[in-house]
Image (cartoon, coloured by chain):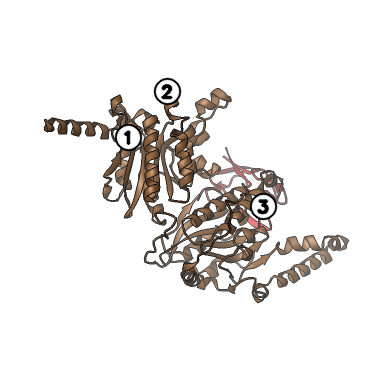
């Protein structure tokens, strides 16, 4: 009697784990997509996930195995993680009532176990036929997003987008700390092109509306753009290696590696303040070789944000890129900076600011886009961060750019300058123009005008000479770029026991 | 037809190519000045220069076309 029951169970599990009909598996192959259980095998150490709940969800329906989602617990880099993974061979990965309940439960598990929550998304969205059971109720789809917000900053939340994340489903990536997207397959939008045509009359392609590349370059909703599913999963595994399992732990320090071979920092930074140089080259000279994991590489490239290791210690780097838009801060770069600073501060990752910033952009276009409040957002994030914060003035740091890059007033543990540093409310040209504009207008001889302006600029440069600023304790030290890596290794080691609270209140009224 | 646009508002310092030149993705084709910085404008596509739409000293807005490639 038991033999029959045993056989029945084996057969039921086999059918569930096979997912949807063969034609849908075929479709996956044609689109260079992997079956959900294959994605899980690639994600987990040794291809092993043994703990899966809700395999029998919607078993009664007969043709909706696991109700289209696999929720499992496994190990990544030796660390336990919880995973939700849509099965797009089952009704296009759409959400029924039990799909939603399974997702909510695995989130609750991640909270109880205090482990990272990973969302492998590939879903057409809600099953409209089932909407009353899964959309509006207290444990309906909205609850998934409420939980994500509740868990935000408690445990890392990672989204890997392999296919669509449509309509309400688009909020899963939106609430994650990071979104990795597979180009050509991943997409995200509140309204599909078909819906947009119907309700507002717009006619566009899927890529234009919500393609992975658009989101990683224009909207900033995507953080990492990859070409294959294998790359996406490897990227998620690498990202996780920089993070502790929850907010009360620190990231694991590994053994260090020397930086990539290359030019010395004193050779990379031009003395002439207006010439571009490649900040990536400077970062390469500082960090352990191969350890730089960039976030939002293709978005707001005038600001570089990424995780790295220095002598094995995880840090978060925020650096201006003079090669892109002169390293000037814009609306998007301010948002990018604010988010990254918060991410690192949430999970005890020390921050390194590398400043070469002419300031925030000026002009009607950015003013109308609200650059003031977006910039304030980044400055608020800098203020609130209580992890060890080191501000390095590489070259120029003018105006609010100094503030956004953790200048002295923002409680960096130190603000140190390279010999090329120039800190001022504005650069010499702009300052002389402002202070002496009447005098300059009065000079009729063009040659004399030029001589006067140059003399005033020279005087101004002398007043902002970095040794003067160090003499007044505005910066805590001046170091050679060639010494910088060692200085940072020592300082981050000394700052390890830092323990401070920023302020006592319910929560800030944040500029947004 | 592809456009190379100004990445930010500023003044054209120099257009570094002329009509008929071959351009590769990554080549610096123009220099702007903005916020007292020298801003290199790179092409993100390959092509042949068919039209120059801005010259030294011109004020350009973000998105203004500087060079047209075939």
Q: Which mark is residue A29?
A: 1
Q: CA distance from mark 3 to mark 1?
A: 47 Å
Q: Please tell me which residue is depicted at 49% across the width and 62% down the height of the picture.
A: A350
Give residue A277's position: percent from left, percent from top.
57, 61
The outermost residue toward the bottom is A471
Which chain is mark 1 on? A
What residue is shown with label 3? A361
Q: CA distance from mark 2 to mark 1?
A: 28 Å
Q: Report whether residue B55 is seen.
A: yes
- Point out the tag, 2 or 1, that comes first from the N-terminus: 1
Q: Which mark is residue A272?
A: none
What residue is shown with label 2? A129
Discs 2 and 1 share one subunit = yes
Q: Is residue A507 left or right of residue A12?
A: right
- Point out the tag, 3 or 1, that comes first from the N-terminus: 1
Please name the color used to draw chain A: brown
Is there a contact, CB below 8 Å, between mark 3 and mark 1? no
Give residue A183's position: percent from left, percent from top.
44, 41
Looking at the image, is mark 2 or mark 1 nearer the viewer?
2
Looking at the image, is mark 2 or mark 3 nearer the viewer?
2
Label 1: element kind:
helix
């Amino acid at each position: 009697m038991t033999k029959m029951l045993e056989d029945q169970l084996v057969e039921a599990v086999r059918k569930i784990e096979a997912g949807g009909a063969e034609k849908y598996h075929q479709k996956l192959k044609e689109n260079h997509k992997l079956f959900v259980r294959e994605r899980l095998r690639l994600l987990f150490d040794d291809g092993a996930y043994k703990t899966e709940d809700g395999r029998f969800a919607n078993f009664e329906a007969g043709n909706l195995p696991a109700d289209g989602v696999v929720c499992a617990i496994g190990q990544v880099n030796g660390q336990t993680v919880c995973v939700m993974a849509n099965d797009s061979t089952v009704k296009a990965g759409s959400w029924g009532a039990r799909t939603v309940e399974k997702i909510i439960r695995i989130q609750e598990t991640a909270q109880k176990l205090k482990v990272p929550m990973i969302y492998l998304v590939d879903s057409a969205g809600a099953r409209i036929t089932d909407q009353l059971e899964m959309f509006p109720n207290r444990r309906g789809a909205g609850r998934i997003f409420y939980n994500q917000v509740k868990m935000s900053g408690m445990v890392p939340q990672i989204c890997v987008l392999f296919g669509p994340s449509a309509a309400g489903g688009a909020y899963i990536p939106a609430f994650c700390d990071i979104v990795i997207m597979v180009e050509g397959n991943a997409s995200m939008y509140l309204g599909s092109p078909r819906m947009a045509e119907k309700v507002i009359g717009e006619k566009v392609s899927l890529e234009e509306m919500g393609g992975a590349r658009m989101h990683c370059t224009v909207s900033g909703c995507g953080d990492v753009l990859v070409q294959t599913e294998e790359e996406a999963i490897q990227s998620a595994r690498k990202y996780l290696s920089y993070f502790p399992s929850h907010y009360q732990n620190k990231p694991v320090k590994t053994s260090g590696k020397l930086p990539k071979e290359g030019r010395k920092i004193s050779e990379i930074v031009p003395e002439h303040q207006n010439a571009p140089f490649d900040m990536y080259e400077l970062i390469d000279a500082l960090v352990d070789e191969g350890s730089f994991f960039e976030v939002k590489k293709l978005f707001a490239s005038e600001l570089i944000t990424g995780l790295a290791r220095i002598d094995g210690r995880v840090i978060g780097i925020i650096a201006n890129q003079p090669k892109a838009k002169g390293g000037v801060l814009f609306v998007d770069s301010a948002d990018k900076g604010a988010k990254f600073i918060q991410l690192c501060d949430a999970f005890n990752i020390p921050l390194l600011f590398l400043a070469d910033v002419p300031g925030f952009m000026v002009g009607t276009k950015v003013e109308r886009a609200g650059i003031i409040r977006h910039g304030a957002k980044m400055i608020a994030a800098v203020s609130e961060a209580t992890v060890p914060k080191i501000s390095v003035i590489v070259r120029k740091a003018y105006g609010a750019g100094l503030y956004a890059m953790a200048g002295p007033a923002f409680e960096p543990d130190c603000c140190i300058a390279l010999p090329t540093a120039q800190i001022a409310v504005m650069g010499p040209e702009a300052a002389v123009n402002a202070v002496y504009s009447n005098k300059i207008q009065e000079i009729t001889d063009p040659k004399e005008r030029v001589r006067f302006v140059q003399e005033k600029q020279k005087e101004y440069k002398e007043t902002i000479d970095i040794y003067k600023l160090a003499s007044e304790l505005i910066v805590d030290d001046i170091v050679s770029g060639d010494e910088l890596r060692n200085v940072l290794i020592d300082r981050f080691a000394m700052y390890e026991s830092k323990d401070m609270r920023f302020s006592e209140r319910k929560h800030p009224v944040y500029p947004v | 037809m592809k456009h190379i646009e100004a990445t930010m508002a500023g003044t054209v310092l120099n257009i570094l190519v002329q009509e008929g030149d071959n351009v590769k993705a990554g080549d610096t084709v123009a220099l702007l000045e903005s916020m007292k910085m020298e801003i290199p404008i790179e092409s993100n596509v390959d092509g042949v220069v068919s039209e120059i739409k801005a010259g030294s000293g011109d004020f350009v807005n973000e998105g203004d076309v500087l060079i047209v490639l075939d």
